[in-house]
Amino acid sequence: MGGGVSQSSGNGARRGRRRGGARAMSEINVTPFVDVMMVLLIIFMVAAPLLTVGVPVELPKTAAQALPGEQEEPLTVTITSEGTVQIMTTETPRAELVPKLRAVAAEREGDRVFLRADGAVAYAQVMEIMGALNAGGFTNIGLVTDIGGPTLDGTGN
């Protein structure tokens, strides 16, 4: 028992080694991975604000809270200060608004639509477009405003 002699050939000491005596690295270098992730994070942080609907509108300010998000991209209808109507970013004549809205409603799962109207647009025009949205099959209409408006209870500005 005990005193066994181990036999080894001259090649046994070289297993696992490369030429020149350098061993293979067994660690994972995460520095390039972190660098790529940081660049992607910066790209997305810069690009995210640009993904909003690009129709310039001066929204009225209110003290209302934001609506909860959805899985489906929300449909946005915009009334510009000149009175033109746009579905997402496509300008749509008022005569074609209801048929286009019906076609869009047939393709969508939800009936939520966001209505953006410039603060200079008359109330009657906003109500006319809301009627067209309802006739087009959208009953869940959210009015989009900017935050920071008066609260009308004497506490806000």
Image: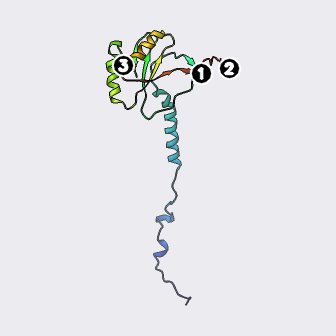
- Front in this rendered view, residue 49 or 24: 49
* Residue corresponding to mark 3: 135
Picture coordinates of residue 117 (x, y %)?
Answer: 47, 16
Give the residue displayed 44% in from the left and 35% down from the top.
71
Residues packed near mark 1 inside 10 Å, few (<14), some (14 to 19) or many (20 plus): some
* Residue corresponding to mark 1: 63
Q: What's the CA distance linking mark 2 and mark 3?
A: 39 Å
* For the residues bearing labels 2 and 3, Cβ distance under 8 angstroms: no
Give the residue displayed 41% in from the left and 15% down from the top.
129
Picture coordinates of residue 29 (x, y %)?
Answer: 52, 53
Mark 2 / mark 3, whichever is N-terminal: 3
Q: Residue furthest right?
A: 155
**Mark 2 against mark 3, which lies toward the viewer?**
3
Q: Determine the secondary structure under disc 1.
A: loop
Quadrant assignment for the C terminus: top right
Give the residue displayed 40% in from the left and 30% down from the top.
110
Residues packed near mark 3 inside 10 Å, few (<14), some (14 to 19) or many (20 plus): some
- Front in this rendered view, residue 99 or 85: 99
Picture coordinates of residue 133 (x, y %)?
Answer: 39, 19
What residue type is disc 1 on? Ala
Q: Determine the secondary structure under disc 3.
A: helix
**Mark 1 against mark 3, which lies toward the viewer?**
3
Q: Which mark is residue 155?
A: 2
What residue type is disc 2 on? Thr
Give the residue displayed 33% in from the left and 12% down from the top.
95
**Up-down: is 124 above or below 55?**
above
Q: What's the CA distance linking mark 1 and mark 3?
A: 29 Å
